[in-house]
Image (spheres, helix red, strand yellow):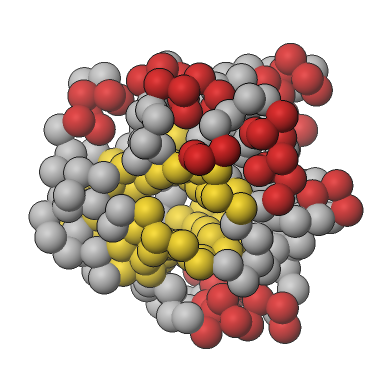
Amino acid sequence: MRFTEKLSNCHPAPGQIGIFWLGQAGFLIKNSKGELLAIDPYLSNAVERICGLKRLMMPVMEPEELNPDCLLVSHHDEDHLDMDIIPGLLSRNPNTKLFGPSTVYRMCQEAGVNESQLVAFDVGEKGVCGGFGLEAVFADHGDHAKDAIGMMVRVEGHLLYFSGDTSYQCSRMEYAASLGADILVVPINGEYGNMNSCEAVDLVNLVKPKLTIPSHFWTFIRHGGNPYLFDREMRLEAPGSDFYFMCQGELLLWDGKIAATG
């Protein structure tokens, strides 16, 4: 089954969500109303074009096949703010809103994106897009992305915490941890200022989610990431904490626990 068919055929029941991993830090969340939230979708070869890093994992869908109701972008790096696809995406979907920090907002403005579709979304700000409640929380991705954010997504009675690209800083992540996330999505690549596997497990122990999904690994040779090390550290340092490795294009149905995968 093609990914787009899988996405179209996903019909979460009330209280249930469909989670799809696009690869890297990209995810799609589908609610029981059929609304679609895209988070940091990277579907082009912009990183290779700009930085010379070829992608190793092919996109699961063509850019023109992505038509979300809401787009949430954590910061302006090319593998998160994919400017090779976003202007076109927003142009063909005039009702889609993009939520992103100030640099993301400015770059989209400069690319000619209609300002009515842009929502400035810096740390501390909250928003609503259809059935999705959104909140921007602390992230530290270094000096080149000073306004990077972590993202809280509330949908169907569940709370998801996407840490975004960030180092681990216990005291500055306490607020996000205190919100009681059901699912934590965390990078494990350990490069470019991101948490490595051991630091990601530290965040797991701080947040204490029902489920952790590791991400941001294997897309580029320089981005690092060791899923086996994360697996080992979780079993040693966070025994009893559930985690799940998704493959690109996989669907995970969640209703408070993993209901089904595919």
* 22 w.r.t. 163: above or below: above
Looking at the picture, tell me which residue is in the foreground, 211 or 164: 164
* 64 w.r.t. 164: above or below: above
Location of residue 78 in the rendering, given as x and y in whole percent from the top left corner: 69, 31
Q: Quadrant of the C terminus?
A: top left
Instruction: Note whether residue 145 is visible.
Output: yes
Instruction: Note whether residue 137 is visible.
Output: no
Looking at the picture, tell me which residue is in the foreground, 139 or 262: 139
Horizontal side, residue 242 vs residue 259: left or right: right
How many numbered discs sit on the rendered protein?
A: 0
Q: Residue at x 58, y 67 (%)?
A: 125
User: Within the image, what quadrant is residue 200 found in?
Assistant: bottom right
Horizontal side, residue 115 vs residue 2: left or right: right
Looking at the picture, tell me which residue is in the foreground, 178 or 220: 178
Location of residue 73 in the rendering, given as x and y in whole percent from the top left corner: 57, 45
Looking at the picture, tell me which residue is in the foreground, 255 or 152: 152
Q: Residue at x 67, y 42 (%)?
A: 104
Q: Residue at x 34, y 48 (%)?
A: 29
Horizontal side, residue 167 vs residue 236: left or right: right
Q: Residue at x 55, y 50 (%)?
A: 119
User: Within the image, what quadrant is residue 5 found in?
Assistant: top left
Q: Quadrant of the N terminus?
A: top left
User: Within the image, what quadrant is residue 163 found in?
Assistant: bottom right
Location of residue 126 in the rendering, given as x and y in whole percent from the top left corner: 51, 67
Location of residue 111 in the rendering, given as x and y in whole percent from the top left corner: 67, 25
* 42 w.r.t. 76: above or below: above
